[in-house]
Image (cartoon, rainbow, N blue to C red):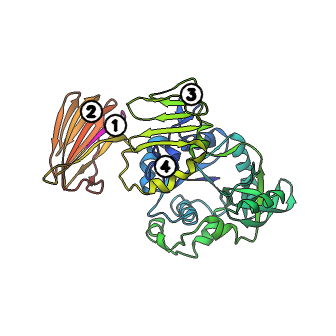
């Protein structure tokens, strides 16, 4: 069995902690079994592994999320990146082409697709196993998970069940995000929420993908990604399929993509450097800044602070944040990379138009920044904690706390952390952008 996790999103509903490259599924806010905190994607992968499903995991995502996934999940999963955002149908098609053409999975292999940001429990994965069994036993070509609705919602699609066959129902009809009155009618008629979980044989999806590309290999298919229509899997596949079944799921299932929903599951009213007094009610603070935050006598609030900004919102109006965030077109101030994290401290333009950008880099022990050079900027690295191995134009030396290195335009450089390594990086030049980079292979001894 192959399990595809969909990891996308624009990172606006949980602003300011999330952004375009650090979407909600990467926020380490959920209590984990070891007493620490884990992200939604870490939780989903952990639960899939603990559930007993004999499944190889593939994560379908955008290129801008690859580093965060590698950093949080490590090895043991496949990662398939979209060249551009084109909705769930193209993302699933590309992941299936990868399984068939790159991993050489056979057409009879059962594939299950699920979102990576649903808050649920192990019973959810038991249901996924039942969906895979239903496909394996030929009960339907496509099996969907139907969430037993908790209330009439305009945020989800609905699936109307038809004839029953054991635990499954045939899918009689689909309704996408109805108005509230229609949602009430659908629930009264027995409809389920569409949980965004799909099971099918790999050959079923490959036949659909082949309607758009005859590429001889996966990488050529990826180059032709634009030929796939920009449309959801529900519209393009599920609603057109002739043999569709629904498996109801009555267990725990929560969409925690808004601050009010997330605050219910993080297990604490305060995360970070903050205090809420005893008179405040139903208020949560998540503070990622070093400066303290104090909340006195405030009720029903969410206060979230990060290097990207500060949100103070009524808990029950948090969904209104998205259009306001769209008005700010600024670079993310915090990013997670496969080697660690960085935080922007200062972004300055001098009187002669020279720009400087100051970052705090945290490189995890044993990880390294690629061998690279830049054409439009100089860099000054000040090592403030830890030890590492520096390569500068082929010359290798040890560096540690108190060392300062000046890297000029065109100089080849790389760094590997022997212990957790903290660096203050000051970039100076006329073009300070992540695209100003040329990478090279370097084999660390």
Location of mark 2 (residue): 388
In terms of sequence position, does the residue under pointer 1 or pointer 4 come before the other? 4
Residue at the extreme front:
297
Q: Quadrant of residue 239?
A: bottom right
Per the model, the C-alpha gap separating discs 2 and 1 is 9 Å
In terms of sequence position, does the residue under pointer 4 or pointer 2 come before the other? 4
In terms of sequence position, does the residue under pointer 2 or pointer 3 come before the other? 3
Q: Main secondary structure of the magenta part?
A: strand
Magenta span includes 363: yes
Per the model, the C-alpha gap separating discs 4 and 3 is 24 Å
In terms of sequence position, does the residue under pointer 1 or pointer 3 come before the other? 3
Q: Percent position (x, y) of residue 80?
A: 49, 57
Q: Nearer the viewer, mark 1 or mark 4?
A: 4
Q: Secondary structure at mark 1?
A: strand
Location of residue 390 with respect to 187 vertically, above or below: above
Q: Nearer the viewer, mark 2 or mark 1?
A: 1
Location of mark 1 (residue): 363
Q: Percent position (x, y) of residue 5?
A: 58, 52
The numbered mark at residue 6 is none
Rendered residue at 71%/70% (across/down) = 241
In terms of sequence position, does the residue under pointer 2 or pointer 1 come before the other? 1
Question: Which quarter shows the C terminus?
Answer: top left
Location of mark 3 (residue): 34
Q: Secondary structure at mark 2?
A: strand
Magenta residues span 358-365
Q: Secondary structure at mark 4?
A: loop
Location of mark 4 (residue): 23
Q: Nearer the viewer, mark 4 or mark 3?
A: 4
Rendered residue at 86%/59% (across/down) = 165
Q: Residues within 10 Å of mark 1 (few under 14, many from 20)?
A: many
């Amino acid at each position: 069995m192959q399990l595809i996790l969909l990891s996308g999103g624009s990172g606006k509903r949980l602003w300011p902690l999330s952004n375009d490259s650090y979407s909600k599924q990467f926020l380490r806010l959920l209590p984990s079994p070891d007493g620490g905190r884990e992200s939604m994607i870490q939780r989903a992968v952990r639960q899939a592994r603990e559930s007993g499903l004999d499944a190889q995991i593939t994560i379908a995502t955008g290129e801008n999320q690859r580093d965060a996934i590698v950093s949080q999940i490590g090895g043991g999963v496949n990662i398939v990146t979209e060249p551009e955002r084109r909705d769930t149908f193209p993302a699933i098609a590309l992941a299936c082409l990868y399984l068939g053409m790159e991993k050489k999975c056979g057409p009879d292999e059962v594939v299950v697709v699920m979102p990576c940001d649903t808050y649920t429990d192990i019973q959810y994965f038991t249901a996924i196993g039942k969906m895979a069994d239903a496909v394996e036993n030929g009960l339907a070509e496509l099996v969907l998970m139907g969430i037993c609705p908790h209330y009439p919602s305009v945020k989800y699609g609905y699936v109307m069940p038809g004839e029953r066959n054991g635990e499954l129902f045939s899918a009689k009809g689909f309704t996408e995000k109805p108005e509230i009155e229609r949602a009430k009618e659908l629930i009264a008629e027995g409809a389920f929420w569409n949980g965004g979980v799909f099971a099918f044989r790999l050959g079923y999806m490959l036949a659909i993908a082949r309607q758009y590309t005859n590429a001889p290999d996966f990488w050529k298919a990826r180059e032709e990604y634009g030929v796939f229509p920009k449309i959801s899997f529900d519209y393009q596949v599920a609603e057109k399929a002739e043999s569709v079944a629904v498996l109801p799921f009555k267990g725990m299932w929560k969409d925690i993509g808004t601050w009010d929903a997330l605050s219910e599951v993080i297990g604490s009213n305060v995360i970070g450097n903050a205090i809420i007094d005893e008179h405040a009610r139903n208020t949560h603070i998540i503070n990622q800044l070093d400066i303290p935050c104090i909340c006195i006598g405030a009720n029903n609030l969410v206060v979230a602070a990060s290097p990207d900004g500060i949100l103070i919102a009524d808990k029950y109006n948090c969904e209104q944040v998205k259009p306001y965030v769209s008005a700010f077109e600024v670079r993310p101030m915090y990013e997670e990379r496969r080697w660690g994290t960085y935080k922007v401290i200062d972004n300055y333009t001098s009187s002669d138009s020279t720009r400087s950008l100051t970052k705090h880099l945290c490189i995890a022990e044993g990880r390294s920044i690629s061998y690279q050079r830049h054409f439009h900027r100089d860099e000054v690295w000040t090592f403030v904690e830890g030890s590492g191995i520096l390569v500068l134009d082929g010359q290798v030396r040890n560096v540690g706390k108190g060392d300062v290195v000046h890297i000029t335009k065109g100089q080849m450089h790389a760094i590997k952390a022997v212990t957790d390594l903290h660096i203050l990086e000051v970039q100076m030049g006329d073009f300070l952008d992540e695209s100003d980079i040329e990478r090279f292979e370097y084999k660390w001894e």
